[in-house]
Image: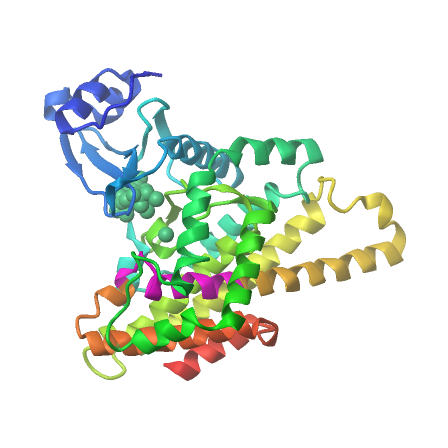
Amino acid sequence: SGQSPYRILREADLRGYLAGLPAIVSQLGGAAGDWSISEVGDGNLNLVFIVKGPRGGIAVKQALPYVRLVGESWPLPLSRAHYEHLALVHQARLAPRLVPAVLHHDGPLALTAMELLEPHIIMRKGLIGAVSYPRFVEDISTFLAQTLFFSSDLALSAAEKKDGIAAFAGNHALCKITEDLIFTDPYRIAEQNHWTAPWLDATAAAFRGDLDLHVAISRLKLKFMASPEALVHGDLHTGSIMVTESETKVIDPEFAFYGPMGFDIGAVIGNLIMAFLASAGHERSPGERASFEAWVLEAVEGVWNEFSRKFLVLWRSEAKGDGYPASLFAGEAGAARLEAERQAYMARLFQDTVGFAAAKIIRRILGLAHNIDFEWIADEKQRAICEARSLKLARNMMLETPSYTTIGAVTYAARELR
Ligand code: ADP
Ligand code: MG
Ligand code: MG
Ligand code: MG
């Protein structure tokens, strides 16, 4: 594969670069001059180009040496492209067909060419448009169960697991973004924080002075930093999922590292809850989005229930790891005790999931990076109402986590606020 010194590729440069890659040339068809190239990156960090030729298309992602959203004043290592590539390859093996296929990777250029997802759209946009996705629960629960189980100590030997941790340990700059932007800044004065003022001024101030909340978010932060349970995607919001009615693809795993499983599951659930509580702000006539809203809450329940069912099936049938030695659970009594322990494990994982989901909600309303679920609500007062409901739910989920014993308790609380 081609290796070149780093430079930011503009359109002409990219065309020339791709023309030198026979596999890409044959995928696109025609001559380099026939290809259309457009930059479509709408994310916070990187450039993404869509390249189309007479035969087919590709997506090309290049990391910038800084945070795109902020600019050159906030440097960020190019190595994130290496970790994203590594994660994509890993996930393709653990959860086939649920991530875009990698076609080419260039380490020094921090560039990856991958399968063009078309006509897929970013799920968040579909949700704002009140579209429901019949494949979503099935696919995302499979993605979560398979990527998390098969990278955990339940499936791997101790040596394989620690090699996996080592392979991603260098991605600490991306982890630090999460540690700061999700687990710290929304709870203190930070230059980049913003919220829908003046309506949320008092709530933002209350969150900055709430020591119970500061303890809760710090526990979650420590869990994020100090729990290498499995290879997590690390940024699994609805802007990292591309969908059609019949397909689901997870993109953008540049934050991947060995962390707590609940962080990924909570990201999905927290983002669906935001889609639900933002929905009122997108309504043009009363009740217009009622069936969509019912679907989103069913999806919240489905994600946890199906994830948990599939994870347990894997644990009962594929537990080749060093985690729970079969020799310690021999016989009928051993089997029964191990099954009870599996249930206890899932109950703990559910608590983590509830806490992380809450953390993901709060950062989108009081922190740096907001989401269009709320931002596209044009009437600021209406937006603030939706955001205030979300903050109320998230605060309760974080402080009263043990009172949420089932996913139904979470959707019940969300429904009560609508
Ligand atoms: P960032 O890390 O900057 O957030 P993403 O990987 O999320 O970058 O990609 C940004 C945008 O580019 C996505 O929201 C999506 O619209 C588009 N995109 C990314 N990958 C693909 C792909 N494989 N096919 C089609 N569009 C893509
Ligand atoms: Mg992204
Ligand atoms: Mg994010
Ligand atoms: Mg990204």
Which residue in the rendered view is the most extreme toward the left? Answer: 33
Residue 293 in sight: no
Is 13 in the magenta? Answer: no
Q: Main secondary structure of the magenta part?
A: helix
Residue 20 in picture, x, y percent from top left: 24, 15
Residue at the image position 27 percent from the left and 75 percent from the top: 384
The colouring scheme, among rainbow, by chain, secondary structure or one colour, is: rainbow
Q: Quadrant of the N terminus?
A: top left
Residue at the image position 53 percent from the left and 60 percent from the top: 218
Residue 328 in sight: yes
Viewer-proximal residue among 24 and 56: 24
Horizontal side, residue 315 vs residue 79: left or right: right
145 up-or-down from 113: above or below: below
Residue 308 in picture, x, y percent from top left: 59, 59
Q: Quadrant of the C terminus?
A: bottom left
Viewer-proximal residue among 222 and 124: 222
84 up-or-down from 137: above or below: above
**Magenta part of the chain:** 355-372
Residue at the image position 20 percent from the left and 82 percent from the top: 285
Residue 231 in picture, x, y percent from top left: 54, 42
Residue 108 in picture, x, y percent from top left: 34, 22
Viewer-proximal residue among 199 and 115: 199
390 up-or-down from 346: above or below: below
Horizontal side, residue 189 vs residue 26: left or right: right
Is 360 in the magenta? Answer: yes
Q: Quadrant of residue 322?
A: top right
Q: Quadrant of residue 362?
A: bottom left
